[in-house]
């Protein structure tokens, strides 16, 4: 099969708000793999979105929407350009299994060439984690679950993509992974490839404080 090349094959992330409404923008993203939060798809729109993206050369997987909300909102997803594959993985720790299909995380495998696939964890953190201790704690629980899951994938390339709705300092398990376990906060070191370190990525409304 095709060999994944880090020189031109890029993994990206977006909070897409609604994958069906923004399907054309998603299809045009210059990446080989794309991970998303808030696809916000009902079952009918999910099928239409997958077919539309497939026509543009993408294979896509989307989770359920957030079961705690009364509307079709939230969820996570993964997309990869053909001929690469993307596939869902079943979490091994019981603490993580109980979060399956609740619209806040996804565990995916993607082809990157060679004998091993990459293991990707996608998180959609609870809103307000920058100041709300309960929201930050719930998101950190997902980080703790992924830390436990990662121990089952020794030797595999691993990454976390997500809209955490909180800084790493508010998520103790994530911060510990960065400080002590060799994980890299790529947004914090974006100058390594010509970006801006710790550049803000989110501004919910005109009065909001921008955040990463």
Image: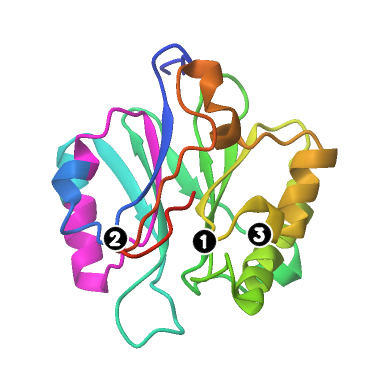
Residue occupied by mark 2 = 17
Q: Is residue 6 left or right of residue 173?
A: left
Residue occupied by mark 1 = 165
Q: Secondary structure at mark 1?
A: loop
Furthest toward the front, the residue is 207
The reply to whether dot 3 and dot 1 touch (C-beta < 8 Å) is no
Q: Quadrant of the N terminus?
A: top left
Residue 42 counted in the magenta span: yes
The reply to whether dot 2 and dot 3 touch (C-beta < 8 Å) is no
Q: Name the mark nearer the viewer: 2 or 3.
A: 2
Can residue 146 be spotted in the picture?
no
Badge 1: few (under 14), some or many (20 or more) residues near its Cα, within 10 Å?
A: many
Q: Is residue 199 left or right of residue 41?
A: right
Look at the picture and state if 129 lies above or below 148.
below
Q: Quadrant of residue 77?
A: bottom left
Residue occupied by mark 3 = 91
Q: Name the mark nearer the viewer: 3 or 1.
A: 1
Instruction: Looking at the image, tell me whether mark 1 or mark 2 is earlier in sequence order.
Output: 2
Q: Which residues are magenta?
A: 26-51
Picture residue at 41% right of the left edge, 20% below the top: 9
Q: Secondary structure at mark 2?
A: loop
Instruction: Looking at the image, tell me whether mark 2 or mark 3 is earlier in sequence order.
Output: 2
């Amino acid at each position: 099969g095709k060999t994944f090349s880090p020189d031109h094959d890029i993994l990206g992330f977006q909070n897409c708000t609604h994958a069906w409404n923004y399907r054309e923008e998603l299809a045009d993203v210059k990446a080989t793999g794309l991970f998303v939060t808030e696809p916000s798809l009902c079952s009918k729109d999910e099928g239409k979105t997958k077919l539309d993206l497939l026509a543009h050369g993408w294979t896509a997987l989307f989770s359920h929407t957030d079961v705690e909300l009364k509307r079709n909102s939230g969820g996570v997803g993964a997309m990869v350009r053909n001929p690469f594959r993307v596939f869902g993985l079943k979490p091994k720790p019981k603490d993580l299994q109980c979060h399956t299909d609740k619209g806040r995380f996804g565990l995916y495998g993607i082809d990157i060439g060679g004998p091993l696939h990459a293991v990707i964890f996608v998180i959609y953190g609870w809103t307000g984690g920058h100041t709300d201790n309960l929201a930050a704690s719930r998101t950190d629980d997902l980080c703790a679950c992924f830390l436990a899951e990662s121990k089952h994938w020794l030797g595999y390339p691993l990454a976390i993509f997500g809209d955490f709705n909180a800084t790493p300092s508010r998520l103790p398990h994530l911060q510990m992974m960065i400080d002590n376990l060799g994980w890299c906060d790529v947004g914090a070191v974006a100058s390594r490839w010509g970006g801006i370190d710790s550049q803000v990525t989110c501004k919910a409304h005109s009065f909001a404080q921008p955040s990463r």
